[in-house]
Image (cartoon, helix red, strand yellow):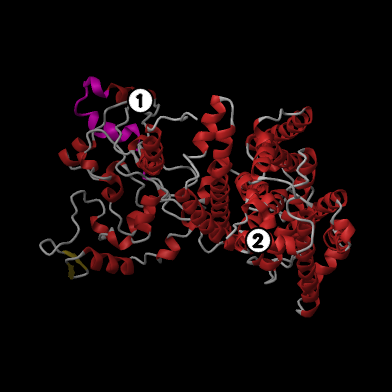
Amino acid sequence: MDEQYKITVNAQETPVIEPGYTFGTVTEKISAIVLTRPASNGWFVGFGLAFMLTMMMLYAIGYLFVKGIGIWGVTIPIGWGFAIVNFVWWIGIGHAGTLISAILLLLRQSWRNSINRFAEAMTLFAVACAGIFPAIHVGRPWLAYWLFPYPSTMGVWPQFRSPLIWDVFAVSTYATISALFWFIGLIPDLATLRDRAAHPATRMIYGMLSMGWRGSARHWHRYETAYLLLAGLATPLVLSVHTVVSFDFAVGIVPGWHTTIFPPYFVAGAIYSGFAMVLMLAIPIRKIYGLEDFITERHLQNSAKVMLATGLIVAYGYGIEAFMGWYSGDRYDAFTLWNRLHGPYAVPYWSLLACNIFIPQVLWIRKLRTSPVALFFISGVILVGMWLERFIIVVVSLSRDFLTSSWGMYYPTRWDWMTYIGTIGMFLAAMFLFVRLLPMISIFEMRTLLPEAEVKE
Amino acid sequence: MPQIFHRSANTLSRATIFGAVFVAAALGWMAMEIQRSPYVTYAGVRKPQPVPFSHQHHVSGLGIDCRYCHTSVENSSFAGIPPTKTCMNCHSQIWTNAQLLEPVRASYRSGESLQWTRVNQLPDFVYFNHSIHVNKGVGCNTCHGPVDQMPLMYQQESLQMEWCLSCHRAPENNLRPRDQVFNMRYQQPTSSHPVAVDGQSYTDQFDLGAALVKKYNVRSVNDITSCNTCHR
């Protein structure tokens, strides 16, 4: 670990943790947010609002169960509306958490230590939001379990050649690994909370969750092995999950879907939007809970650089799509490009280009990369842009395919919007609970970054 | 600092984590079993009827052919439920005063049909045709079971889709010569009981079935397991 620390010092940059902290003060500062700090009025207002949005989502879904899919804007030819747009968007957002926790761990990027915990929580909640959509989109949601292969009395299995069933496996594997990874990483910190909690009930709860962790050398040894193994398992998922999601489109022959660029460009887009969400969460959290010493300018800057890089990959994807529209000589591909630029959905498409490609280029300016306010807004723009990208892919391609006689338009209804905004509420409500109930920064991993942790020979 | 949990918590937690796997597996297995049990399928359940009509008595006791009552089975999707007149062909002569048969006579007098309780009920989203099965050599008792041994009618099979498919995926396992379709005592060929078709003797169901598939032009497994064969 000391080597990582040296790298930090030698970099002559803002450190990943401000000087002056000791093992004790780090532990105290992070655990106090959960254990001793009273919930502020702001927290209650924020949680209340998010909870109300969650209720709105449940109302919209309840009404959907009563009335059926007809309350949504989906119809033929656009059978995949908001539900699929939102599903892809949420799954993509989750990817940053896995990238930060697994890939950056394997690459020994110690700056990840202060943001991996809540990035992983973000992953879990985003996957939960994403998981809602396919289930309610099947039309008869009480039969959604048909998605899973099980020995049914119908004597038939799901179509294993369809990317939709690959999706079921990809997403459920992703959710399982993310939950395990998050929980195992939490165990040493839950034990810290157990040891510091004053109330017996609190001690009991954290005690049960920490599964008898005593911090012995054997525990640490097993922990490190398990964590590394899970990181190894999670790493391919960062690439595979959104690749499989992109197959939902790429395997179809609809113009605008049927391209080989989709997997890498979906993965880059996922990480792009995920880091935007990480920043949108980290910036207010570090301000409100006074964690600027732990989530420093360095973290903001690194995240901004990741966004810049992945944003350029996404831009390359758009460029190749446009190029292939011309180069393939396929009139339908060419028309798809023309239709995006000039068709009925030109406004969303130009907004998408602005949000995902043009505006984020300001991140080349160092001053903006280190400004929390600017980053917050740019991240918001990117999230909107990535949502628009999925909207363009799903809706525009379906609205005008090969036969002009089967062209159509898609108009989302208020139930579409209520469900979508409701999932944002659910996501935020879960985040609000998370920051109050669990250590949002990994205490023990932060301790390894301190000078105290340096081994003297 | 005092311990929060008693030392037994160690064993308890290990046991619950280990046990959870088995509990989850058992729950899954239970769900599968319940779904296939008579509780859901009604297989083997005798349903009350307005008159306790005994197929056993009429078929094995008296030797009446299936088609005497189920007249349309060979050329219609529906096998047919006999009108009261069919009953009265005999019962105007025998058992004319039997109390048990009073509902039959009442129906004959008033002209109102007897309201039998349906036993073999397929869902409405399934298109089923008796005539095609009978004409391709599927015996009555292949699906309906030993009706000649049923004092009160019950459904023999689960009627679940996996049961339909078990035959549609391998029809040769169940086919018999057309003239044996209504034979309730038909036995599949063995070396001691060969079955003759077109002068050739078969000692094995697989050979017989394959020959009948060809002879009766049973369509390919791909065709008869296609969704729209049954869900039209």
Q: Does the magenta stretch include residue B82?
A: yes
Q: Quadrant of the N terminus of chain A?
A: bottom right
Q: Which residue is drawn at 28% across and 53% down?
A: B139
Q: What residue type is labelled 2?
A: Gln
Q: Quadrant of residue A349?
A: bottom right
Specify the segment rendered in magenta.
Answer: B79-101
Q: Does the magenta stretch include residue B208?
A: no
Asked whether the beta carbons under mark 2 and mark 1 sit within 8 Å of each other, the answer is no
Q: Which chain carries label 1?
A: B
The answer for how far apart the CA atoms under marks 2 and 1 are is 95 Å
Q: Name the residue under label 1.
A: B107
Can residue A46 be spotted in the picture?
yes
Q: In which quarter of the image is residue A331?
A: bottom right
Q: Name the residue under label 2.
A: A4
Q: Residue at x 70, y 63 (%)?
A: A7
Q: Position of residue B142 (x, y in %)?
A: 28, 51
Q: In this view, does B92 lie above or below B205?
A: above
Neighbor class of circle 2 (other Cα within 10 Å; few <14, some 14-19, many 20+) is some
Q: Which amino acid does label 1 sit on?
A: Ser
Q: Which chain carries label 2?
A: A
Q: Where is residue A379 in the image (x, y as percent from the top left)?
A: 81, 52
Q: In which quarter of the image is residue B209?
A: bottom left
Q: In this view, does B154 lie above or below A262?
A: above
Can residue A392 be spotted in the picture?
no
Q: Position of residue B131 (x, y in %)?
A: 37, 53
**Relative side of A376 to A199, left or right:** right
Q: Residue at x 63, y 59 (%)?
A: A2
Please identify the residue farthest to the left as the structure is shown.
Answer: B192
Q: Is residue B149 above or below residue A344?
A: above
Q: In this view, does A409 lie above or below A419?
A: below
